[in-house]
Image: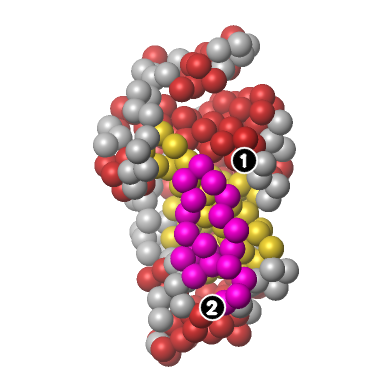
């Protein structure tokens, strides 16, 4: 319903994308929360990650748990359009990072149409979009997922591996394609200032990413000690409750006093 209402005055091509493969509309109402990714050296917001929520603020886990396999395409497209529209309404000036479901994209060149149409409709610059591929999701067709990422990179979008170190592919995914950003999962960053094993592992990942030209984002940062240890290792982009919690339909300002 949301997509049909949003694109009510759109061209036939866009309407065709909404109805692609006879997909039924995604009925449950959704909202977007945003959490900043902070550049601690510049003391500025590098990007905001869009995080799906239910109509009453239900968590992403609750929302995703209710999505049926046949609804994946409509859900993925709804989240993209809603994230862009909400970001523009809130006056976002940074990059906007959007998680996408590779298992929901059947043809990259076709399935990007609604994203571009939404950005054009609300006036959000497409070059400020980042697409995150989560390593925590089991990818049914890795070759297809890589084709999506490469298509996005060729279009000038920034790309990221989310939850790096938490999931199914690990270094193999990084070997197959080099994203602009690698987001270290909180399982690696938690208490890293107190854990020499995690420091050794992350140090190796940081060195590898530097050699490949990928920037590191440390996720799940909750204590100053974690931030300072990672900063000493050469990490400059951070995301976590220490800096700011997600804001429902809001752009939270980071707390720079912890830096």
Residue in the picture at 54% in, 20% down: 6
Give the magenta-colored segment's residue range. 239-258
Instruction: Give the answer, above or below, for where 248 lies relative to 26.
Output: below
Number of numbered discs overlaid on the protein picture: 2
| Magenta stretch, main secondary structure class | loop
Residue 8, image quadrant: top right
Q: Quadrant of the C terminus?
A: bottom right
Q: How is the image coloured?
A: secondary structure
105 or 222: nearer the eye? 222
Label 2 neighbour load within 10 Å: few <14, some 14-19, many 20+: many
Q: Where does label 1 land, which residue? A: 90
Residue 247 lies, in percent from the top left, at 49, 51
**Image point (58%, 50%), residue name:** 251
Report x, y in % for residue 95. 66, 49
Task: Select label 2 or label 1 by which is in front.
Answer: 1
Q: CA distance from mark 2 to mark 1?
A: 28 Å
The answer to whether the residues at label 2 and label 1 have Cβ atoms under 8 Å apart is no
Residue 31: tell me if it is visible: yes
Label 2, secondary structure: give it. Answer: helix
């Amino acid at each position: 319903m949301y997509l049909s209402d949003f694109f009510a005055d759109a061209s036939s091509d866009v309407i065709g994308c909404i109805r692609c493969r006879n997909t039924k509309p995604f009925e449950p109402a959704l909202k977007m929360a945003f959490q900043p990714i902070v550049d601690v050296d510049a003391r500025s917001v590098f990007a905001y990650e869009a995080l799906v929520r239910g109509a009453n603020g239900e968590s992403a886990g609750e929302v995703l748990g209710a999505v049926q396999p046949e609804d994946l395409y409509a859900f993925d497209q709804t989240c993209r359009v809603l994230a862009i529209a909400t970001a523009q309404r809130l006056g976002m000036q940074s990059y906007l990072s959007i998680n996408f479901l590779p298992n929901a994209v059947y043809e990259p060149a076709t399935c990007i149409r609604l994203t571009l149409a939404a950005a054009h409709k609300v006036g959000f610059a497409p070059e400020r979009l980042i697409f995150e591929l989560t390593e925590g999701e089991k990818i049914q067709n890795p070759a297809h997922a890589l084709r999506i990422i490469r298509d996005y990179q060729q279009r000038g979008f920034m790309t990221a591996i989310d939850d790096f170190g938490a999931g199914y592919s690990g270094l193999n995914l990084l070997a197959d394609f080099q994203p602009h950003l690698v987001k270290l999962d909180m399982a690696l960053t938690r208490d890293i200032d107190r854990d020499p094993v995690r420091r050794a592992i992350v140090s190796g990942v940081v060195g590898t990413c530097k050699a490949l030209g990928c920037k590191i984002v440390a996720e799940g940062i909750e204590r100053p000690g974690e931030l300072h240890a990672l900063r000493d290792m050469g990490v400059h982009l951070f995301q976590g409750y220490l800096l700011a919690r997600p804001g429902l339909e809001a752009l939270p300002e980071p707390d720079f006093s912890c830096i």
